[in-house]
Amino acid sequence: MSRIVRIFMSGIFALLPILVTLFIATWIANFMRGWVGPESSIGQFLISIGLNIATSPVAAYFFGFLILVACILTFGMIVESKLRPLLDRAFDGILQRIPLVSNVYDLSKRFVSMVDRSGSDDIKSMSPVWCFFGGDGGAAVLALMPSSQPVMIGACEYLAILVPSAPVPVGGCLIYVPSAWIRPAEGGIEGLTSVYVSMGMRAPSSLPEEPAAQIP
């Protein structure tokens, strides 16, 4: 009996990721339909826009939706241009001053920065590294190195590393460590992110044993 239960539970856990994915996808589809569907307030607004082009409500909604997509693409081109820092400062300056709204806005920015890979140029410019505290054989920490340019503290060279926070690798602790403690890590930014998002459940790539792999 216990073997049957174990086999049944194995099947459940094997199917669970697929079922959860289908559930979330269905929920998102229903949410978007209720939010921007023809019966919603936004849908009625899109129909009113499209009525200037077509008389049929279905065609009017379609043309209104295309106009909305074109507007979003135009705004995206503006964001991708050099005006993005100006827009970010403007939105931050307005929303960060509103009580409660500022907390929601900050949380949403963190979530979007985690999901949006296209806008993570600052993170992509960093290098994943291993830091061995105390030197080779010491505690190993998987971190991001913002720059390979050493900083002189006294007579020693130090490198800045960012130890991300799990499971959200968009923040963390900035530490300056001796250059001799640093080794390059394999797997790239995506590999490091997957390790932290999984909270260690996914093993990082192995470290090359050659001493030449040390950061100059």
Image (cartoon, rainbow, N blue to C red):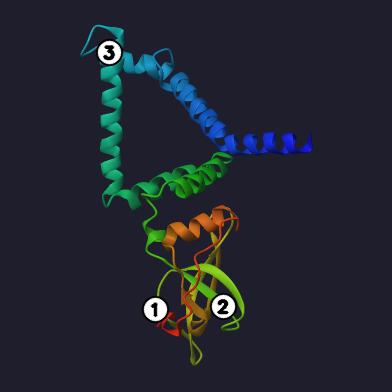
Residue 60 numbered tag: 3
When asked about the image quadrant of residue 188, the answer is bottom left
Q: Are marks 3 and 2 in contact (CB under 8 Å)?
A: no
In 3D space, how far apart are the residues under numbered discs 1 and 2 (Cα atoms)?
19 Å
Q: Earlier in the sequence, mark 1 or mark 2?
A: 2
When asked about the image quadrant of residue 145, the answer is bottom left
Task: Indicate whether 91 appears above or below 163.
Answer: above
In 3D space, how far apart are the residues under numbered discs 3 and 1 (Cα atoms)?
57 Å
The image quadrant where one finds the N terminus is top right
Residue 169, horizontal then vertical, whole percent: 52, 56
The residue closer to the viewer here, 173 or 188, is 188
Q: Identity of the amino acid at label 1?
A: Gln
Q: Which residue is mark 1?
A: 149
Residue at the spot 49% in from the left edge and 65% down from the top edge: 205
Residue 132 numbered tag: 2
Residue 46, horizontal then vertical, whole percent: 33, 18
